[in-house]
Amino acid sequence: MAILISGWLYHHYHRDIVLPTTPYEFSIKPGSNLKQIARQLFDEGILPNAWSLILLSRYQGKESALKAGDYRLTENLSQIALLEYLIKGDIRQNEVRFVEGWTFSQYRKTLYDHPDIQNTTAEMSEEEILQIINANEKSAEGLFFPDTYYFIKNSTDTEILQRAYQTMQNHLQATWSERMESLPLESPYEALILASIVEKETGLESDRAEIAGVFINRLRIGMRLQTDPTVIYGLGDQFDGNLRKRDLQTDQSYNTYTRAGLPPTPIAMPGLASIRAALNPAETDAFYFVAKGNGESKFSTNLADHNRAVAKYQKRQNN
């Protein structure tokens, strides 16, 4: 009898199971236990029963070794091969990328357009989204770290936003603890605001810390930041790609030409390099800079030199 049972089990576990379709894709959610996984594969028509995979996993001592993820089977295979596949975790990677300098509205559109992400926030306000992810801030701008995030198919947008928010908090707190002394910044959130401006103003990586140094110098003496990206952000949909003199003269909460200090919120999602630059800026005598048109910036210590640099490089760009 033992020989007959052993022979039957050997045949049962080595015989190919027939997939419902080829290729066949399925997902195992994080936190699923062996019984849940076996039942899921049986319900989807992959396994002839649930108990055989459970028995095989326990016999091999692999009950807790099965990995969550998105799987793609391209051919029929035996239960032993399937178990090895689930243990190895040869999963199909789903990813979404958030880019440095993007705004929250661009993040939302990217999540909404992704075919493998469940959109649950399309009708929600920013405040409602922040409440769901347990964020205390009043504005979502700047709160989500730009990076590539991998996820299980049919994950929700809030799950990914929660991870991006926590990643930003971790980076911000770690960098804040290593900040330069005597900075004119009262909180990590103010550092985030400044980092977002540095992100939008930086054309060349080597200029990042000095650009941050210019803004720190201005904040220290109460000089207005006078940075175009904040004005453009404040204009919102009114901005048509051409920043006019009247835009710089019209007061609004993000106009750093008419108002001193930092704007009320970040203006974009800064990367780690910009956060580090804001909290550890270059020690510089410069109070001004202008883009040269090739990605670099020209820094000046006084207004007269700055005006000459502006005339020189703006003339070059217009030619």
Image (cartoon, rainbow, N blue to C red):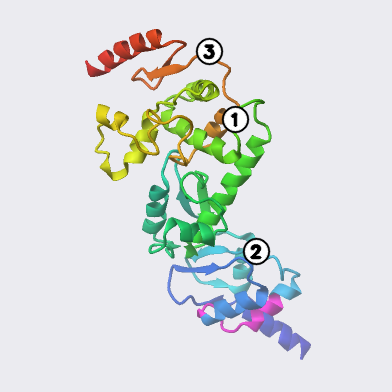
Q: Quadrant of the N terminus?
A: bottom right
Query: Disc 3 marks which residue?
Result: 285
Foreground pick, 16 / 101? 101
Magenta stretch: residue 128 in it?
no
Q: Which numbered mark, 2 or 3, is in the foreground of this view?
A: 3
Foreground pick, 79 / 193? 193
Query: Disc 1 marks which residue?
Result: 279
Foreground pick, 255 / 65? 255
- Amino acid on which disc 2 is placed: Ile
The residue that appears at 39% across and 52% down in the rendered structure is 110
- Picture coordinates of residue 279 (x, y %)? 59, 30
- Amino acid on which disc 1 is placed: Leu
The residue that appears at 50% across and 69% down in the rendered structure is 26
Element on which disc 1 rests:
helix
Query: Disc 2 marks which residue?
Result: 87
Pointer 3: residues within 10 angstroms few (<14), some, or many (20+)?
Answer: some
- Picture coordinates of residue 81 (x, y %)? 61, 68
Give the vertical position of 209 relative to 286 (above or below): below
Magenta stretch: residue 54 in it?
yes
Q: Quadrant of the C terminus?
A: top left
Foreground pick, 156 / 312? 312
The residue that appears at 55% across and 23% down in the rendered structure is 220
Give the vertical position of 104 relative to 58 (above or below): above
- Picture coordinates of residue 255 (x, y %)? 37, 33
Q: Which range is magenta? A: 44-56
Pointer 1: residues within 10 angstroms few (<14), some, or many (20+)?
Answer: many
- Picture coordinates of residue 123 (x, y %)? 38, 64
To which quarter of the image does residue 111 belong?
bottom left
